[in-house]
């Protein structure tokens, strides 16, 4: 009986062009929810202002069953570990051509009105300082999968407490910038993670 072979590189290469063509078709499809360039620009400025104001905590998608807690970075910047909920919040508001002002953002952060988790366990809630759930901002409830055109991972395996400001800045911009966000039908969730598909949604593509 033959054993399972190692996946050969030629297999994905044979399909790469077809996957890329599907990504291009979805990018150009009028039924695909898109964010206007004007709204994306306003969000870009808001994110820059947020990053530049060190009195404001940053939301980061890196957690270990500690969503909603408050940590400190290497420079002392306050950080709140989250799942993908803040990105869904951004996409939903941006799609509606809504962008908070810096003052509104500050109030949202202070009053725990920006979702940090889709749903928390009892253990997480017990230690969380921020507990806002995704709720009405969920794109999943409407049949979509939110994806990032470019990877949002950190450049090192260091803990959040050891992460430097430059890595945090790059992460937050990739994580929350509308120019790096797109949705696909939930049934296509896996395709959204394939580089030959997602490359069509990159801002510089």
Image (cartoon, grey):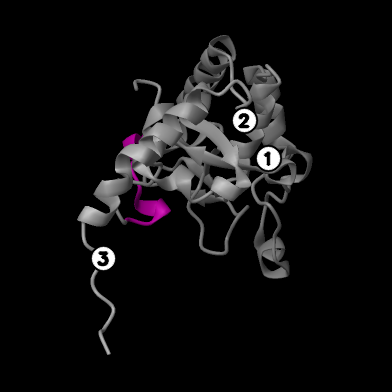
The quadrant holding residue 75 is top left
Q: How far apart are marks 1 and 3 (CA)?
A: 34 Å
Q: Earlier in the sequence, mark 1 or mark 3?
A: 3
Q: Residue furthest bottom?
A: 1
Q: In front: mark 2 or mark 3?
A: 3
Cβ–Cβ below 8 Å for labels 2 and 1? yes
Number of the label disc, if any, that sits on residue 91: 2
Q: Is mark 3 on a helix, strand or loop?
A: loop
Q: Position of residue 6 (x, y in %)?
A: 23, 71
The quadrant holding residue 5 is bottom left
Q: What element carries label 1?
A: loop
Q: Which residue is drawn at 41% across and 36% down?
A: 198
| Residue 126 in the image: above or below residue 145 | below
Q: Where is residue 91 in the image (x, y as percent from the top left)?
A: 62, 30
The residue indicated by pointer 1 is: 139
Inspect the magenta stretch and tell me whether residue 79 lies in it.
no
Q: Earlier in the sequence, mark 2 or mark 1?
A: 2
Magenta segment boundaries in residue numbering = 158-170
Q: Position of residue 101 (x, y in %)?
A: 66, 17
Label 1 crowd bin: few (<14), some (14–19), many (20+), radius 10 Å: many
Q: In this view, does 29 lie to the left or right of 123?
A: left
Inspect the magenta stretch and tell me whether residue 159 lies in it.
yes
Q: Earlier in the sequence, mark 2 or mark 3?
A: 3
Number of the label disc, if any, that sits on residue 7: 3
Quadrant the C terminus occupies: top left
Quadrant the N terminus occupies: bottom left
């Amino acid at each position: 009986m033959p054993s399972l072979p190692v996946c050969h590189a030629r297999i994905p290469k044979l399909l790469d062009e077809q996957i890329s063509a599907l990504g291009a078709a979805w990018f150009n499809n009028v039924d695909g929810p898109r964010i206007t360039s004007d709204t994306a620009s306003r969000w870009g400025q808001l994110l820059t202002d947020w990053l530049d104001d060190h009195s404001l905590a940053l939301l980061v998608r890196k957690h270990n069953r500690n969503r909603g807690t408050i940590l400190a970075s290497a420079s002392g910047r306050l950080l709140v570990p989250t799942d993908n909920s803040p990105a869904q919040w951004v996409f939903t508001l941006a799609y509606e051509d809504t962008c908070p002002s810096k003052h509104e953002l500050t109030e949202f952060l202070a009053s725990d009105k920006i979702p940090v988790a889709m749903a928390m366990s009892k253990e997480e809630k017990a230690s969380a300082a921020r507990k806002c759930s995704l709720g009405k901002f969920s794109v999943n409830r409407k049949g979509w999968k939110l994806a990032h055109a470019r990877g949002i991972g950190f450049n090192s395996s260091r803990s959040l407490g050891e992460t430097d400001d430059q890595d945090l800045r790059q992460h937050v911009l990739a994580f929350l910038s509308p120019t790096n966000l797109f949705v696909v039908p939930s049934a296509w969730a896996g395709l959204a993670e394939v580089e030959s598909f997602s490359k069509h949604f990159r801002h510089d593509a």
